[in-house]
């Protein structure tokens, strides 16, 4: 690999190769290394770095890690930089009332969607950024940044209705601490807790149900709404409704796409709506792309609808003065200060 890619490499023993890489080439070197080693090799091959000619220093040995972790850390470095330099914003997608005219639906809420950019202002797919954060142990920081950003941009755009904020429960260790900080910033911004709904994502990964219940009851007792996202994707969902008693469930796009032509999906969604209604939970159908899907979900009794058919997520311009904007920025910053991030 090294010869064909133009790096100077030296075999120092039967198990060790030393490669000189310029600082500016590290990114492409790690990418090429990933391509050359197969899965287990990438996870097991030991690597260390040094800027000296000798590899024998204790510091270099202390830095010994696997090729995989070195790569993750390097990638995550970019993420930390994007957070610190505020290379992110929140876009919003409306959630509309299902009752009424589909041609002029009334807006119930907006879901905030976090968008993060690299140094060349290219948007990084959010799922990629979050999985990178998870591997680099930065999920807490990224999830907090995303929540903070949602509140900031929602206030700056002065949007009507509620705001739905995605929230990954595995990023929270101490709900009370986190809640106090979030709640006080929300009050400072002039929002009411009832304007804010936390949309819990990745519930299928929550191994500790009591932890999840604890977080939810903290948020609900403080007056925030709680929604469970992605009901119906994979196996996630039904067993959680009984235990968590959310205010809303969001039916995953997987069940919505083509529902007007699929009796099997209609049957499942009909039952989900029935269970939700029985438990006084409101139903949001997301991922609606056609009028036929929207009409069918109206007929099945969904409460709210969301999807490209109504509007794609997009950035909204500020509707505040410069002075108001800096006040908002100050209030939002306090979320991080109180959490020590
Ligand atoms: Ca969501």
Image: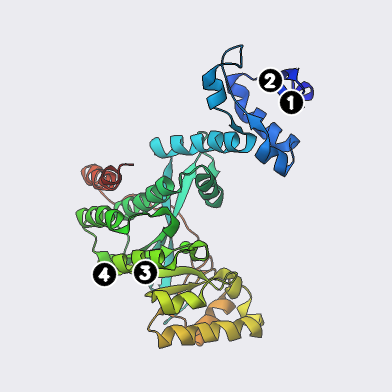
Closer to the camera in the image, 183 or 176:
176
**Quadrant of image for the C terminus:** top left
The percent coordinates of residue 230 (x first, y second) are 52, 68
CA neighbours of label 3 inside 10 A, class few (<14), some (14 to 19), many (20+): many
What is the CA distance from the residue labelled 2 to the residue labelled 1? Answer: 13 Å
- Can you name the residue that lies furthest to the top here? 53
The disc, 2 or 4, on the residue closer to the chain's N-terminal end is: 2
Classify residue 30 by image quadrant.
top right
Q: Which mark is residue 259?
A: none
Residue named by callout 4: 221
- Can you name the residue that lies furthest to the right here? 4
Label 1 sits on a secondary structure element that is loop
Camera-near label (1 vs 3) is: 1
Label 2 sits on a secondary structure element that is strand
Closer to the camera in the image, 11 or 136:
11
Q: Is residue 105 visible?
A: no
Classify residue 186 by image quadrant.
bottom left
The disc, 3 or 2, on the residue closer to the chain's N-terminal end is: 2
The percent coordinates of residue 152 (x first, y second) are 32, 50
Q: Are marks 2 and 1 in contact (CB under 8 Å)?
A: no
Label 4 sits on a secondary structure element that is helix
Residue named by callout 3: 226
Residue named by callout 1: 15
What is the CA distance from the residue labelled 4 to the residue labelled 1? Answer: 59 Å
What is the CA distance from the residue labelled 1 to the residue labelled 3? Answer: 54 Å
Answer with left or right where residue 277 lies relative to residue 255.
Answer: left
Closer to the camera in the image, 304 or 21:
21
Q: Which mark is residue 19?
A: 2
């Amino acid at each position: 690999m090294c010869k064909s890619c133009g790096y100077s490499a030296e075999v120092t023993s039967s198990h060790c190769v030393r490669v000189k890489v310029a600082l500016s080439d590290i990114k492409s070197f790690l990418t090429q290394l990933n391509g050359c080693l197969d899965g287990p090799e990438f996870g097991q091959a030991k690597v260390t770095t040094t800027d000296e000619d000798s590899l024998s220093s204790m510091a270099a040995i202390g830095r010994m890690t696997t090729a995989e972790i070195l790569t993750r850390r390097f990638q995550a470095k970019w993420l930390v930089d994007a957070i610190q330099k505020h290379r992110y914003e929140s876009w919003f997608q409306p959630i509309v009332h299902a009752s009424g005219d589909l041609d002029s639906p009334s807006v119930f809420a907006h879901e905030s969607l976090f968008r993060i950019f690299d140094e060349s202002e290219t948007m990084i797919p959010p799922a990629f950024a979050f999985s990178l954060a998870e591997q680099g142990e930065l999920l807490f920081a990224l999830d907090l940044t995303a929540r903070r950003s949602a509140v900031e941009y929602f206030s700056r755009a002065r949007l009507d209705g509620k705001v739905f904020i995605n929230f990954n429960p595995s990023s929270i260790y101490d709900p009370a601490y986190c809640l106090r900080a979030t709640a006080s910033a929300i009050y400072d911004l002039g929002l009411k807790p009832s304007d804010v709904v936390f949309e819990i994502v990745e519930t299928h990964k929550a191994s500790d149900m009591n932890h999840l219940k604890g977080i939810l009851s903290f948020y609900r007792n403080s007056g925030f709404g709680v929604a469970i996202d992605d009901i119906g994707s994979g196996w996630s969902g039904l067993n959680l409704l009984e235990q968590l008693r959310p205010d809303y469930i969001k039916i995953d796009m997987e069940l919505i796409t083509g529902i007007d032509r699929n009796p099997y999906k209609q049957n499942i969604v009909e039952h989900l709506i029935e269970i939700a209604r029985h438990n006084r939970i409101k139903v949001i159908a997301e991922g609606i792309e056609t009028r036929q899907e929207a009409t069918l979900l109206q007929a099945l009794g969904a409460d709210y609808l969301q999807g490209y058919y109504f509007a794609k997520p997009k950035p909204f311009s500020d509707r505040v003065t410069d002075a108001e904007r800096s006040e908002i920025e100050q209030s939002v910053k306090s979320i991080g200060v109180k959490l020590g991030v």
